[in-house]
Image (cartoon, coloured by chain):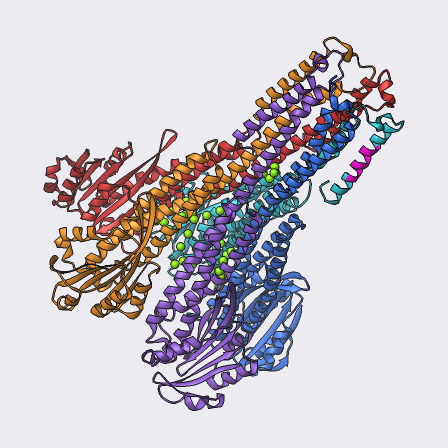
Chain colours: A blue, B cyan, C purple, D red, E orange
Amino acid sequence: MLVNCCAYQNGKRIADIQKNEISDYIHRPDTFVWVALYEPSAEEIDEMAVQFSLHPLAVEDARHGHQRPKVEEWGDQLFAVVHVVEMAGAEINTGEVDIFVGPNFVLSVRRGTEVGFQAVRERAEREPELLKAGSGFVFYALIDNIVDRYFPVVDFLEGQLEKIEERIFKDGTSPRANIESLYDLKGHGMTLRHAVEPLIEAIHKLYGGRVPQVCVGTQAYFRDVYDHLLRVSQQLDGLRDMVVTAMSVNLAMITLEDNKVTKRLASYAALIAVPTLVAGIYGMNFKNMPELEWTYGYPMALVIMAVSDFWIFRRLRGAGWL
Amino acid sequence: MLVNCCAYQNGKRIADIQKNEISDYIHRPDTFVWVALYEPSAEEIDEMAVQFSLHPLAVEDARHGHQRPKVEEWGDQLFAVVHVVEMAGAEINTGEVDIFVGPNFVLSVRRGTEVGFQAVRERAEREPELLKAGSGFVFYALIDNIVDRYFPVVDFLEGQLEKIEERIFKDGTSPRANIESLYDLKGHGMTLRHAVEPLIEAIHKLYGGRVPQVCVGTQAYFRDVYDHLLRVSQQLDGLRDMVVTAMSVNLAMITLEDNKVTKRLASYAALIAVPTLVAGIYGMNFKNMPELEWTYGYPMALVIMAVSDFWIFRRLRGAGWL
Amino acid sequence: MLVNCCAYQNGKRIADIQKNEISDYIHRPDTFVWVALYEPSAEEIDEMAVQFSLHPLAVEDARHGHQRPKVEEWGDQLFAVVHVVEMAGAEINTGEVDIFVGPNFVLSVRRGTEVGFQAVRERAEREPELLKAGSGFVFYALIDNIVDRYFPVVDFLEGQLEKIEERIFKDGTSPRANIESLYDLKGHGMTLRHAVEPLIEAIHKLYGGRVPQVCVGTQAYFRDVYDHLLRVSQQLDGLRDMVVTAMSVNLAMITLEDNKVTKRLASYAALIAVPTLVAGIYGMNFKNMPELEWTYGYPMALVIMAVSDFWIFRRLRGAGWL
Amino acid sequence: MLVNCCAYQNGKRIADIQKNEISDYIHRPDTFVWVALYEPSAEEIDEMAVQFSLHPLAVEDARHGHQRPKVEEWGDQLFAVVHVVEMAGAEINTGEVDIFVGPNFVLSVRRGTEVGFQAVRERAEREPELLKAGSGFVFYALIDNIVDRYFPVVDFLEGQLEKIEERIFKDGTSPRANIESLYDLKGHGMTLRHAVEPLIEAIHKLYGGRVPQVCVGTQAYFRDVYDHLLRVSQQLDGLRDMVVTAMSVNLAMITLEDNKVTKRLASYAALIAVPTLVAGIYGMNFKNMPELEWTYGYPMALVIMAVSDFWIFRRLRGAGWL
Amino acid sequence: MLVNCCAYQNGKRIADIQKNEISDYIHRPDTFVWVALYEPSAEEIDEMAVQFSLHPLAVEDARHGHQRPKVEEWGDQLFAVVHVVEMAGAEINTGEVDIFVGPNFVLSVRRGTEVGFQAVRERAEREPELLKAGSGFVFYALIDNIVDRYFPVVDFLEGQLEKIEERIFKDGTSPRANIESLYDLKGHGMTLRHAVEPLIEAIHKLYGGRVPQVCVGTQAYFRDVYDHLLRVSQQLDGLRDMVVTAMSVNLAMITLEDNKVTKRLASYAALIAVPTLVAGIYGMNFKNMPELEWTYGYPMALVIMAVSDFWIFRRLRGAGWL
Ligand SMILES: [Mg+2]
Ligand SMILES: [Mg+2]
Ligand SMILES: [Mg+2]
Ligand SMILES: [Mg+2]
Ligand SMILES: [Mg+2]
Ligand SMILES: [Mg+2]
Ligand SMILES: [Mg+2]
Ligand SMILES: [Mg+2]
Ligand SMILES: [Mg+2]
Ligand SMILES: [Mg+2]
Ligand SMILES: [Mg+2]
Ligand SMILES: [Mg+2]
Ligand SMILES: [Mg+2]
Ligand SMILES: [Mg+2]
Ligand SMILES: [Mg+2]
Ligand SMILES: [Mg+2]
Ligand SMILES: [Mg+2]
Ligand SMILES: [Mg+2]
Ligand SMILES: [Mg+2]
Ligand SMILES: [Mg+2]
Ligand SMILES: [Mg+2]
Ligand SMILES: [Mg+2]
Ligand SMILES: [Mg+2]
Ligand SMILES: [Mg+2]
Ligand SMILES: [Mg+2]
Ligand SMILES: [Mg+2]
Ligand SMILES: [Mg+2]
Ligand SMILES: [Mg+2]
Ligand SMILES: [Mg+2]
Ligand SMILES: [Mg+2]
Ligand SMILES: [Mg+2]
């Protein structure tokens, strides 16, 4: 689906154009065309491939999606794959954005994410001085927008971890639920990591060493994105480390619980077994058992049972078994 | 076994030839010979070694098989070892393909995999413009075909993991079966990893820095293969990480089960021991035990037993022990 | 909040100035202005951005805080983010200091830490020979001061670990408390690590290879800071390694405790069950049981019970079960 | 002990010589002397040091043995330390070979391995064309021979792992024996790893970049050795990974066994406790217990016991506890 | 404390001198002064700093001690920090040696180790040919001496590990003591690692690439030290790996022991419970129980108990539970 197709000259939008007008604009000086597609059909992509002379291998990637994050140079064009990982309410949503950039165009192909790049367009148009830098700045603004969506996700994950940590060290919670939550957390952390890690390397090449021509002049901006990515990465490192630790802590807590249960089992057994023994003794059939003849023999036996249980109970409670 | 032996000129097949005609063709301009062997005898390999002037050390590797993936330069020739890991129905099948490439020939030696490279030949012949690039393009097409077989395998493994994950967190499944499945998964992941990791480095050298002469002009294609390999590698990284985590989760579940069993054991013991104690008390032989004389003493005892068990049962159920 | 604003010439303080006088001083030769802000408002930062021509992207970072440690070059200026991790009594306190340095100014933005840099100012003013080197030396002195605060923290953490180690191997302590302490220790170690690790790389660039102009002449000092950071890092490595090990040791201790409890449970059970069996035997209703007729049958039964329990007790104690 | 001392010219053995004749031969053109020592005395080594002008530090290493694998350049000579790890029947045997190579000599010092290098000598003499390359080729042939001995070891270790894997997942085997075997396997893997890893780096320097003069012309052969070492290394990586996993699987199996034992314990307890309770009830001394008067009261009680046990047994079996 | 202060010329000791004579000697050609301090006061260090023009930052490190191992260049001087880890009887002793080296002097500052460097001095004086190389050779000899002390430590640690390994797999030893020993071993290994690892990198710079002037001519010797350090490092790697493995093996052994205890508990319970049931049956009060009337009813009951226990005992023993 074609979301948008506009021409910009010297940092200002000059026209909303039709697909077949693209070629009229991209050869004008200081002009570039910015096209946004949303889950396009193969035909729509092919059409754009012709308009912008995209490389067949890059087009193939854009058509299939499910690529890993990367930035590739094809002649004077760039082809970038960026994973979207964003909060959608209390859920984590994932998608992919493929971006083609040439000296005079930017083409974004968005999949699996409902939030589009209208905000990017508005921001860019509010800063015509920066937008003058051309398609490279739009390229930066798109990636920056996607990377900014990572922060709420990593904050959400850290929040989840904190909740689980509290539960782990609190009595009376289900260790099973903790394990499931930690396992989920681990999985989500990995999803974000797989979006972030390859992008770090890719963005690094856009501002250090030999810089692709379309990015010249916006290096400082890509360095800033790079820095944000490193921050997400570091938070993810910490998260992963603590999740692993929390898992082993949880296992220790479960084993501790096992100890506690065994102790309680032993305690209850003792509390029942001792009176049972007393009853057994007075159930013996010896002819000559004086207590059996006593008037208060029976209450005495019950008192013996109660007293010994009381004594056992106090000892076990004192030892923390009960 | 000789599967195929054809000569190509300017991207078109010009003849299906005999082994002894090879030398007639390989010296013609813009011509190359494409030979495919399947589990050849030592003699067949030696014959080819003579025809194409292969290096003895490379020939030795091809004769023995079981090499690690690599791409070696021998003068103006390349020798590549690639592991095949592919789905054969619901099973993972492994094999090895050794490829010799020179400016005017491609020789593939396939072992342990039933699916051959007919599809590669057909694809290449459908794209004469690309095939014009010569033996380097055929070399790419072969490797691309093998690498494409890795994706279904890694998808299969991820599917297996998801099935096990579901089972782990579901009651009433055998943790033992889960461990075995995870252990198998780990092993299969490693097999694929050992095919992929060394190949990443090897392919990298075919498009970056100094590129071997036979690959000049097809670098973009090898970069694409490289990118696919990185994708498999990243998926394998994630898989390995989650398998390790799932194993420790499974262990925690087993320990939890242990807790549950101990609790149930203690519960049943209590439910039997308390009435036994009551019975013991009324089995004592004291002369003076008024209850024994009561008309409804016996039913009263049974009621005491039932009531105390009912009370114990409710408490244990409430505590989640039963 | 503006804490301080002074001008220095040839290593000596020449004036405490107002914000609007800054521009009068920064263009004098051999003069620099040193400004210290504490949790400034956005407006205060913007004002300084104008005075010192700071880059918008760096200003944005300083305004938001919560950056990862780094040193960035913006033209002939440096922008540094340093995390403060310091002891505040027996608590670990964290904060952030952002530092802008130009050839003729130093601007520090401090957040979340009560201890300021008065000590740095005093030290610098006591060493006019070094202060003559200009803003680069002040930059060093600030970072050195923050890095010196890391040592008490890492010593505190090592002390905590030693206390926990003692407790782990001592009977009668709560393994649960040990786990919680170790988990906390792990978290604090990670906080410090995240402050230290990125700074190592950043500081390395201030004395090796191409050195930013403002740091020229003070490389030896930055190398010294670098060396201190490596020392903290190494201590943290060791700490992390031992914390992980201590956790698994603690788990082993818990499992050992489980063994002990099970053994004790079995012992007590045996001590009660054997007399119960004896009582059961003499509670049988056989007509012909000679012992029942004996005058001392009953005491004999009690003696049998006592002797067998004594024998069992001795064996269990000997085996270490009791 | 001197095993062998021969002179070679143009790839052919020209004489078996005495130690004191060495100096007569090593200055002839296209000639080199090949000396093999087996566990020599310090004097024998010193003698050779004089004959071949070996460097004192290298000689010291050769005298003491127990070096880590390495290849060092001393002027135009090379000094190599290679660990022998080889199968001796079903046992793993270790030794060390120190090799000195100069433009006109090869001196091997073998320790702790009974299999010598007669095979190397025979192979070399069968290939005079290669032997013409001089001492460098002999050097290669020696290392190649040692590296070829690693493969049976790693295959043996992989075979051991497979046997243990089978045992782990089979009922009725001793988990204790499995742990011991895995621990041994880990140790042996590490021995081989310590032989292989340092050698990889050392061999790499003999064919890539600046190549020592004595290895010039045989680089392709050293690259082949390098490739073999990488293969061993990869197999060892996989082995190590699987050993660690197998250990944790084994631990899970032990914990599972614990569950099973606890369940069985609980089952047997229930099967005995319920009839005991029934017997206790009919052992009560109430005056008015009609069943006691019944003619078939006793058999009825026994039937109640049997039926309840049968019912319990079926339930427990159904739940997999028995 | 000043231990020694001598002047050397052309490899020979020419005088034992006073502190204030140092300046007379260090400017003579081919002469150097060798000073050894033992736990000096701040004043003694300052005095030397003046005599040899040491850099303030290096002097500060030497005054405080507790630095990490390193070699720093200060102009034409070197400042080295080396950790001493040595056996003192059956204990591991740690200390630190700081070494300043200039073209015409060597100053060693020793702390926390009783064994000094008299042996180094004697060795150096026995080899005047090497000592002629000047202060660089003395520097090497000092470091070599310290590194040689690492080997007995690592051998001691490996010996400790072997003892623990034996104990782990032997019945009747305390797993608790094993854990403590392994934990200690881990800690000692880390101490040595922290001495060795940073030194490896530091020494590497003294013989490869650009070599500091005072080390020129002794590179081969520093390469030898480097090689020794790598050997220690590799042994420590192996040690660490095996300690971790031994810990998890020990945990598995503890869990196994738990199984055994539970089995034994169940066995004993069964051996007592079955006769108790029999006794209970014959304790029932049915009017019509023929066995009770039999003359040999009572012995028969005892025989039933004995036989069933014998049968249970044999089954349990057969199953390895007893
Ligand atoms: Mg991950
Ligand atoms: Mg990753
Ligand atoms: Mg990272
Ligand atoms: Mg990080
Ligand atoms: Mg980072
Ligand atoms: Mg337990
Ligand atoms: Mg692996
Ligand atoms: Mg691998
Ligand atoms: Mg990877
Ligand atoms: Mg990855
Ligand atoms: Mg990757
Ligand atoms: Mg347990
Ligand atoms: Mg960390
Ligand atoms: Mg980190
Ligand atoms: Mg570190
Ligand atoms: Mg470190
Ligand atoms: Mg370090
Ligand atoms: Mg290892
Ligand atoms: Mg390794
Ligand atoms: Mg390896
Ligand atoms: Mg490998
Ligand atoms: Mg490899
Ligand atoms: Mg590895
Ligand atoms: Mg258990
Ligand atoms: Mg360590
Ligand atoms: Mg370290
Ligand atoms: Mg190491
Ligand atoms: Mg090592
Ligand atoms: Mg190693
Ligand atoms: Mg090493
Ligand atoms: Mg247990």
Q: Is residue C214 above or below residue B109?
A: below
Q: Residue at x 78, y 29 (%)?
A: A296
- Residue D230: percent from the left, percent from the top? 39, 46
- Residue B14: percent from the left, percent from the top? 46, 51
Q: Nearer the viewer, residue B180 or E116?
A: E116
| The N terminus of chain D, quarter of image | top left
- Residue B156: percent from the left, percent from the top? 59, 47
Q: Is residue C83 above or below residue C269?
A: below
Q: Nearer the viewer, residue C90 or C21?
A: C90
Q: Residue furthest top?
A: E295
- Looking at the image, residue A101 sits to the left or right of residue A4; the answer is left
Which residues are drawn in magenta?
A: B303-311
Residue B179 in sight in this render: yes
- Residue C209: percent from the left, percent from the top? 34, 69
Question: Residue C221 appears in which quarter of the rendering?
Answer: bottom left
| The C terminus of chain D, quarter of image | top right
Question: Residue D21 appears in which quarter of the rendering?
Answer: top left
Q: Is residue B298 above or below residue B110?
A: above
Q: Main secondary structure of the magenta part?
A: helix
Q: Nearer the viewer, residue C186 or A93?
A: C186
